[in-house]
Amino acid sequence: MRRSLFWSGHVWWGIAFLIVCLATFLVPSEAYSQDPDSIPPDSARVLGGITVRVARPAITVGGASAVVLDIDSLGGMPSPSMDEVLRSMPLIQIRQNSRGEVQPALRGSEDRQITIIMDGVPLSIGWDHRTDMSIIPLTAARSVTLVRGLSSILYGPNTLGGVVEVDVARGPGHVEAVDPFSLGFSIDETGANNMSVTAGRLISGTSHQWVVRGGGGFSDRRGYPISGEVLTDKSLRAQFLSDDALRLNSDRRRFDGFLSARYLDEDGGWASVAVSGFDLERGVPPEAHQNKPRLWRYPEQRRMIAAVTGGTGQRVTGWGEGDLEASIGFDVGHTRIEQFKTVGYRAIEETEDADDRVITGRVLGEHTLGADGALRASATIAEVSHDEVLTQTSSGSAEFSYQQRLWSVGLETELRPSARGLTTITLGVSHDGANTPESADKSAVDAMSDFGLRMGLSSLVTEGALVHGGVSRRSRFPSLRELYSGALGRFEPNPDLKPETLFGTEAGFTVTGSSGEIQLVGFHQRLTNGIVRRSFNDGVSGPRFQRVNQHEVRSSGMELLLSGSIGGSTMTGDLTVQSVDGFDVDGSVVDLEYEPAVVGKLGFDMPIPGQISLGGEARYVGEQKCENPEVGGLQALASSTSFDFGIRRGFDVSREGILGRLDVSASVKNVTDSAIYDQCGLPLPGRLLQVQFRIR
């Protein structure tokens, strides 16, 4: 079924692309001093690179809690996907669903309530108002920021429960240096391989600076290994579980490439262009706890993301200082889904071909309010188009076109009332809206709008001790897929869905000492009209799902984040304890899917003799529940514990030239070969040995 890797035209195109990148950029870069960047809407410290070594807490301008990870690219996975990076982050849950998509969850907030942005382009605005993180390569990423709390009001529509922001080329400020060349390669015991090549050049003059980068990545696997503990589980259907000792239909082949350029002048004005894309073929592992799971493959999945951004930099005006930033984003893609009749994946029953286009525009401005504050404003507009062709082997084809427009305007002020500036108060208000000009053959949805509010506070009570908190109200409008998609017969559309509204509060403290940091945050969130899925069986079409509005979803809990060092060793830990419940109109409690009461991680990184570094991480996820349409309700998903270990060493290659260091690492994932589940019937890989090389 799979095309020959060696003779694939995409691979030849990819090799040509990498050669061009190397020929263009393989020149030693020049160093340049770095100026402070202007403050973004939520100014958390950022992270770059691939391998997480130390997790540290941070606070954004408005008092929202965030996470900073000190990243070391040495020994990291070449051409990583977004989910591979975020799975290493503390206090965020990452899960693969039955469509093969990987999604985040925070504090009871699910994937569609978390905004994902790449160079100002909101990847979570589209047909489904979320993005599959497993197919978003981060080969090009310079930095990633996670705001896990109540984020700024200025991020645009549908931002409720957190923000993941990836920067490729955008941003003011001088760049100190650019890696002129980097080559990475990894291989695991199943033969799966992953490689990346990047190159860059920094050109600095007396009055300007250019930064140009390009590269690409490639990954291929036949499938991932399955835990022996999973194979002995009598509740799972063996025919949907494994094939030749690998997880059934879990193969994947991906190529990605990027090209970016940024210009900065002596007055602080800047402009950037970034284009990235990928071509993917993959299978979707079936849910092994059902008799009729999805039997899907994605033979074609292509996407291109382009962002054009520019800013004035900080400029002196008649009232103080200010800057202005504008961006235009294009996100286009094509997806083909094949649904098969049997587990042999040969006889196609139905196909879905979808073309998506999202065009976004955003303007962000900032101006000082004397010496004691700042005023910020933003405007965001997005147009989503989705065209699909559904083909059944028994009845022919049908075409459908959908369109949605979303917009948001926001105003936020930051004040420092004390003369010493130890306390910062942020107040914000927004107005958001959505309409659906095209709804194919289904009922149109009336235009919707709502307001948002946010107040945040942070105060340095003593040296090294900061208290912080916030209150927020935001709404999210149903996506086109939630309203209209039948998911090849798996879902019943529901055009009557209402917007969901989140009211959230958080408060906590961060203490920083000479050997480490600790952050403790308590939160409470109330989601009204939350969109959840419910299973049913109408006796005609068999077991199916439908998205409905839950009267209310309440989540309360506590997050603890620790990081510290002893000598050359570092320790990190995070713990989330939460209670998440749904409520019907009559006040009765309704259990929800995939809301574990306890989640935590503990990691370490330590040097050992021979210039070798040893690291490891233990993860625990408490018991959860999941909807099973074949039993007409929820069933339990047991708690799980897993352990990873790794070892790495660096070698100096040359003191001159573009190749200076070689790093070699080996890791064992899921050392105990435990049964670990993202969702019911969808086990994660068993024990897996991987070796990685990187030279730069």
Image (spheres, rainbow, N blue to C red):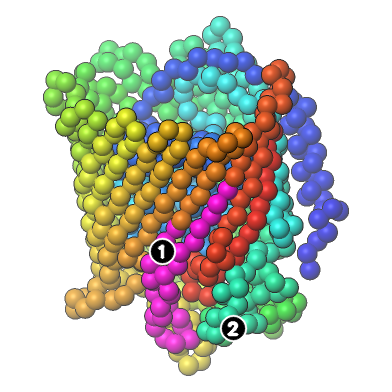
Camera-nearest residue between 613 and 452? 613
Q: Per the image, is 636 magenta?
A: yes
- Numbered disc 2: secondary structure: loop
Q: Which residue corresponds to the image point at 67% horizontal and 40% vertical from the top-left?
A: 664
Give the percent coordinates (x, y) of residue 376: 30, 31
Which type of secondary structure does the marked residue at label 1 adopt? strand
Relative to 17, say whether 232 is above or below.
below
Q: Amino acid at mark 1?
A: Val
Give the image quarter of residue 19.
top right
**Whether residue 148 is visible:** yes
Q: Which residues are magenta?
A: 619-646
Task: Tell me which residue sits at (39%, 74%) in the image.
Answer: 625
Looking at the image, residue 308 lies above or below residue 630: above
Quadrant containing the C terminus in the rendered view: top right
Kindly identify the amino acid type of the residue bearing the numbered disc 2: Arg
| Numbered circle sitting on residue 237 | 2
Residue 245 drawn above or below residue 334: below
Q: Position of residue 119 (x, y in %)?
A: 51, 37
Helix, strand or loop for the magenta stretch, by majority: strand
Percent position of residue 447, x then y: 35, 58
* Residue drawn at point x = 50 percent, y = 14 percent: 33
Image spot of residue 321 (x, y percent):
31, 17
Left or right for 408, reference 51: left
Farthest residue, direction front: 609
396 relative to 629 in the view: left or right: right
Q: Which residue is farthest bottom? A: 539
User: Which quadrant does the N terminus fall into?
Assistant: bottom right
| 544 or 556, nearer to the observer | 556
- Is residue 58 visible in the rendered image? The answer is no
Residue at the right extreme? 7
Please give the residue where the numbered disc 1 appears in the rendered image: 621
308 part of magenta stretch: no
